[in-house]
Amino acid sequence: MTKLTSKSVSGTSFHKITIETTLSNLIKVLGEPQCFQNDGEDKTNVDFGCETESGDVFTIYDWKEYKPIGMDEIIEFHIGGHSSSVTRQAKSELLDLLSK
């Protein structure tokens, strides 16, 4: 199942796959994000580096919110990966985790 990773997520990119949830839900199922500067000063406030059950790396991040994100605020998080198939698989695994 999806988990945080210590592998490099360098080279991942957005393939038009997103997930709507809250920051607190993501933290509950994944743990603390690797990058967390929730001040709205940059294009992203939070970034999780993860891997799928099969070991493919991907990222989950807010994009251009330009404001601090409330822990229980539902927003659209982007999923970045090395291919669209990886990001689709990541979304599927995340939805499974979030539904439990």
Image (cartoon, helix red, strand yellow):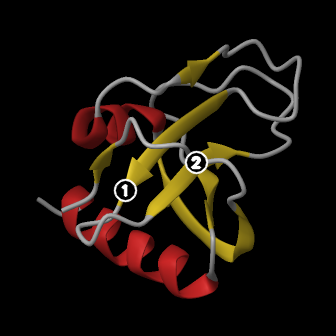
* Tag 2–tag 1 contact (CB < 8 Å): no
Q: Amino acid at mark 1?
A: Glu
The number of discs equals 2
Q: Residues within 10 Å of mark 2 (few under 14, many from 20)?
A: some
Q: Residues within 10 Å of mark 1 (few under 14, many from 20)?
A: many
Residue visible at 86% across and 42% down? 64
Q: Any mark on residue 51, and which? A: 1
Q: Secondary structure under badge 2? A: loop
Task: State the residue in front, 25 or 4.
Answer: 4
Q: Residue 58's spot in the image, x, y percent?
A: 52, 58
Residue visible at 46% across and 27% down? 33
Task: State the residue in front, 5 or 43.
Answer: 5
Q: Residue 29's spot in the image, x, y percent?
A: 24, 42
| 38 sits left or right of 44 in the view | left
Q: Secondary structure under badge 1? A: strand
Residue visible at 81% across and 24% down? 67
Q: Residue 86's spot in the image, x, y percent?
A: 49, 78
Q: Earlier in the sequence, mark 2 or mark 1?
A: 2
Residue visible at 39% across and 35% down? 6
Kindly identify which residue carries mark 2: 9
In the image, is residue 55 above or below residue 37? below
Q: Residue 51's spot in the image, x, y percent?
A: 37, 56
Which image quadrant for residue 93?
A: bottom left
In the image, is residue 71 above or below residue 52? above
Q: Amino acid at mark 2?
A: Val
Which image quadrant for residue 15?
A: bottom right
| 38 sits left or right of 59 in the view | right
